[in-house]
Image (cartoon, helix red, strand yellow):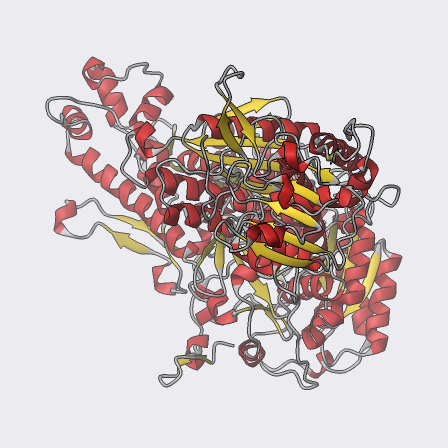
Amino acid sequence: MRNIRPTKGHLHQSLGRIPTPLNTRSLLLPTTTTTGAIRSISSSSSSPAYSRPPPALNLHAVVPQRTFSVSSQVEKAKMSSSDVEMGEAGKAKIIDGTAIAKQIRTSISEAIAQLQSTNPTFHAPHLVIFQLGSNPASATYIRMKLKAAEESGMTVEHIQIPSDEESGAPAGTGTKRLLEAVKKANQDEKVSGVLVQLPLEGAGKTEEKEVVDSVDVSKDVDGFHPENIGLLSSRIGEPYFTPCTPAGAIKLIESTGFDLRGSNVVVLGRSDIVGTPVCALLRKKDATVTQCHSRTKNLKEIVATADVVVAAIGQAEFVKGDWLKPGAVVIDVGTNYIPDASKKSGQRLVGDVEFESASKVASFVTPVPGGVGPMTVAMLMNNTFEAAKRAWTVRRAKQLVPLPLEILEKVPSDIEIAVAQTPKPVALIAEEIGVHPDEVESYGRYKAKIELSVLERLKDRLDGKYIVVAGITPTPLGEGKSTTTIGLAQALGAHLHKTAIACVRQPSQGPTFGVKGGAAGGGYSQVIPMTEFNLHLTGDIHAVTAANNLLAAAIDARIFHEATQSDKGLFNRLCPPKKGVRTFSKPMLARLHKLGIDKTNPNDLTEEEAAKFARLDIDPSTLTWNRVLDTNDRYLRQITVGQAPTEKGLERKTAFDIAVASECMAVLALSKDLADMRARLGRMVVASSKAGDPVTAEDIGCAGAMAVLMKDAIKPTIMQTLEGTPVFVHAGPFANIAHGNSSIIADRIALKLAGIEQGDDVNRNGYVITEAGFGADIGMEKFCNIKTRVSGLQPNAVVLVATIRALKMHGGGPAVTPGKPLDAVYTAENLDLLEKGCANLGKHIENAKKFGLKVVVAINQFSNDTEAEMALVQKYALSVGADYAVPANHWAKGGEGAVELAKAVIDACAEPSKFKFLYDLNQPLVNKIEIIAKEMYGADGIKLSAEAEAEIERYEKQGYGGLPICMAKTALSLSDDPSKKGVPTGFTLPITNVRLSAGASFVYPLVGDMSTMPGLTTRPGFYDIDLNPETGDIEGLF
């Protein structure tokens, strides 16, 4: 006879009709097997929300027609026809665990189907089983669990990782891979339960414990995590899960109808897997429990007092019938092999109780096999179902916890408000909106990058509602689009409890130290920490600067080398032999393809082909690529390069632009993923050859290196508002020569995080608020005609920001000049002037309607605005076609001041989007320019300069005629003249030149002179900025 003694950490149980050795237990990883609903793999996400037992949840309330519980199913199965009555008097009734377990599995399957029929977003529970090595016994038990999961209406994955011996890897490799796989499963919200099958081949007790402990407590469906085990014996909380074998044993006792309250129960066994947990469960049933083991003295006498005996001692037929109290209930957990010549295998499976003698004394007894074993697997299925329900309920109940905002009647400075608020850790913000820990790349405590992998994870989710914030024609001081964007997000998220994510551009440091200031919003509607927001942030602008200037350096170097070398010398230096072998680099192969040369070996090129390949023959007069710097510097608007003697007289005039004017920034903002960004960088046209062919960054050979410099910049940065709602900060393209919007990637990620699943309640929809630069005639038009064409996203509504100040200016008020006091007309009530200026608002409402958008006018209230003025604008806006017009005081009151605006936005987004484009791309460039001029600006037509006509002809000849238009025009007037306010009429729009951004995929006509490098005023903002040497705090930024 072979006796198996219990060892700590191992489970003794009988699984159906398959013997389960004492040292085998379930826990689950990379051979993947799939059969029907069965797949081999599994795990889920770790979250601080699970650091303690969850609050009591009515997990069955979602199915009022049917409340499922294991107890109810045991009651149904109690003493059913499947229970075998012994034929002679005095014989015990057999508790048929196989029948009860089958009933439980069937009922779980029915409950899952019922839950899914009423809640389409509830998905079938998914169990992941990991196995290290290929132990045959473990494989048998895993197959049983796979089958049970399928019968229970669940999906299951079995992930098998080779042991170190099998793979030949260094010791500990298999365990390390297993830990990594468990971590991944912990973070996968599709995984309901994680199970690791023990033993782990080649792992010691320490490694085994490390793996078991690594399973997320909320997915520990085996119930063996230390937190679950500890809470099992606690009176102050409940575990997430009860270990399966002890739970099954209790259900088998209850199936007999025996009342455990006040009864004497003897438990034989002290393992952490069965003996100790079953004692804890029995005590919670108000039983009086005595726990014994193989060395307990007077064991026979103690057992004789028991109303119930639970045997889990690991010794074959240890408990005899004459030990038992007549009528006792006997639960046999043991699994032991003893010799049996009548069996083909030469042995048979028995329990810890001598069944023959016990059945003559006990009232009820479990057989081995067919008793506790099947119930263990059934309880595993029950735990997995409960895990799925709990995770689903918690996910749906999860809400952002806003930061309290202390509002002062006299609004302090922006910097004072910002530093007075303590932000939440950025990891918490990310968790609250459903971003997993492995999708967050922290840059300190309060800002982080979001991995693009979140898009793949949420690809099946419907997008949230999409709102673009634009404005009327502004004063030079700005009208608060950023402040409104943030205030609206705070109102939706912190006050109306919607998922609301603001998407804004990263501000340039040029204006920050110049005159305009930052772009974090203002008053009680800001992005924080505002100092980090307005300075380096996560380095994206620096990355764009480096990539841009690498290309600029490469262009000049190529012109120099082509001017000073023969065709042959140039080719030999471009393709030098390395160890006697010449090869083409990746960008060189791309250039050969462009030239129609189908050769990959440099030695195979003819002399003519080699010259054609090596010489770009750039026409310097067509160069459009400037160097950039993120500083306002007027003396870099025109410079001469190549003056050193080493450049051999190859001088040329060029210029610097501010960094955000670089086409690299526009590419970053319009890229859909990393591959798209790499392709766009390669397509950027920097000049034309003397033959008139476009020369691209790919031709120059450094597009790949530029992509490397920008590989982290493509990830959006997550920050927060003053009230703790999420903000995505990403990209900052100029709003004149570029499209002036934050990135497509940030919007796409935000829309998925704010979205809902198919079949979900539409009232659970979230909102993404993205800002468009300048007035609606520029920023909104480019958002609609450029950004949405690339992204394929459709906005639901536009929030049009208007101020009393700007409308008075458009009505004929005095000039508004930065740095100078406002005229008294702007601080006193003047309804006549205001009414005249409302025409500008009316034109922008008309423009927005041309895109099929719902229009919500946000009247951004300043401290001097009167109720009569606000009412006048509100009445006018509604009379000319606005769907909603709402005063908002978010600058002074934060999100509370924008609640009515937020409600209007929710109403506006209730209907499906009817968005449409302003023009068809399949028409000449001139026609598209004219449509924008007439429809958006109110011009009578356009007038092209000779240079503009020549450029348009060249671009269309080169194949760029099908691109959208990005007008580079003043933001201070609907016309080309910034001094013309209101709604100018009777003008022709002059197009002085036309430029190409082939990588960003648009053509930008220049309306008048357009500076791309701001200068510094007499008194720039940097005079007020300093560092406190004692505290390290930044002072005077705003």
Please give the name of the residue rendered at 78% of the width and 31% of the height, measured from the top-left corner: 83
Q: Is residue 416 above or below residue 641?
A: below
- Of residues 889 and 5, the one nearer the viewer is 5
Question: Which residue: 55% across, 36% down?
Answer: 317
Q: Most extreme residue toward the left, as rendered?
A: 580
Q: Nearer the viewer, residue 973 or 750?
A: 750
Q: Give the left or right position of residue 954, taking residue 459 as reference.
A: left
- Counting from the top left corner in percent of width and height, residue 734 is at 51, 54
Q: Position of residue 562 (x, y in %)?
A: 21, 33
Q: Is residue 5 left or right of residue 567?
A: right
Q: Can I make out residue 850 in this image?
A: no
Image x and y of residue 909, in percent: 79, 49
Left or right: 981, with 743 as reference point: right
Q: Nearer the viewer, residue 293 or 776?
A: 293
- Residue 680 coordinates in the image, percent (x, y): 45, 36
Say which residue appears at 49% left-offset and 62% top-offset: 447
Q: For the point 31% across and 31% down, which residue is it?
A: 165
Q: Quadrant of residue 604?
A: top left
